[in-house]
Amino acid sequence: MCKHNDSNELRFLCDLTVVKLGKKLRILGFDTEITRSIRVDEIGEIIRQTSRRLITKSRNLANTFGGILVTKNRVSEQVIELFAILKSLNIEITRTAARCVNCNEVLEDCSKEEVIDKVPIYIFETVEKFKRCPKCGKVYWQGTHLAHLQNLKQQTLRRKETDMRGENNDR
């Protein structure tokens, strides 16, 4: 099984309030555990055992665990908000290998022949590169969904740089 465990890598824990955001972060390559627990002690134990940074919409949980509080409701807005928060904390946002939305495993390259019976025929005929989760076997390919998320990330980074230049000019 392929495990990616870079000690400098951002590792997140998304609680029940931001499950969809957690899945988007996995698509973008961030090591993101998702918990459906609402018990504070269980969430705290996961954070202690895995050294993850909590992302939540709960002000109480964010304060208790030094987590990241997101306030937006739409997932695309949450992605932008999260990247802006990380940037404001001077946390570098780097993308690592893509991860499985279901398992959080790092995806591995696979040949077209390996996925012939696992993807729609149109996709098989039009896409050249595929990735597969080594744990659950789910197959992934580059599509517009990932491109849209990466575009959101770039917009956020550009917006933050523009904001910072504006602040420097005001001084």
Image: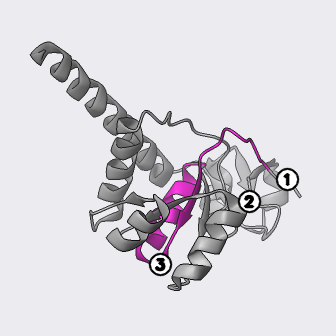
Instruction: Tell me the distance, in whole angstroms, between the alpha carbons under discs 1 and 2.
Output: 7 Å
Query: Magenta span covers which residues?
Result: 4-29
Residue visible at 34% across and 58% down?
78
Residue 105 is marked as: 2
Category of crowding for the residue at label 2, using alpha-carbon neighbours closer than 10 angstroms: few (below 14), some (14–19), many (at least 20): many
Q: Nearer the viewer, residue 59 or 145?
A: 59
Residue 33 visible: yes
Quarter residue 154 falls in: top left
Q: Is label 1 in contact with label 2 (beta carbons under 8 Å)?
A: yes
Quarter residue 17 falls in: bottom left
Q: Is residue 41 left or right of residue 130?
A: left
Q: In this view, does 66 lie to the left or right of 70?
A: right
Residue visible at 46% across and 54% down?
145
N-term mark: 3 or 1: 1
Give the foreground label among 2 and 3.
Answer: 3
Mark 1 — residue?
A: 2
Residue 38 is marked as: none
Q: Residue 16 colored magenta?
A: yes
Residue type, mark 3 in image: Leu
Quadrant where the C terminus sits is top left
Q: Residue 6 colored magenta?
A: yes
Residue type, mark 1 in image: Cys
Residue 120 visible: no
Q: Is residue 126 above or below residue 72?
A: above
Give the foreground label among 3 and 1.
Answer: 3
Mark 3 — residue?
A: 16
Give SS at disc 3.
helix
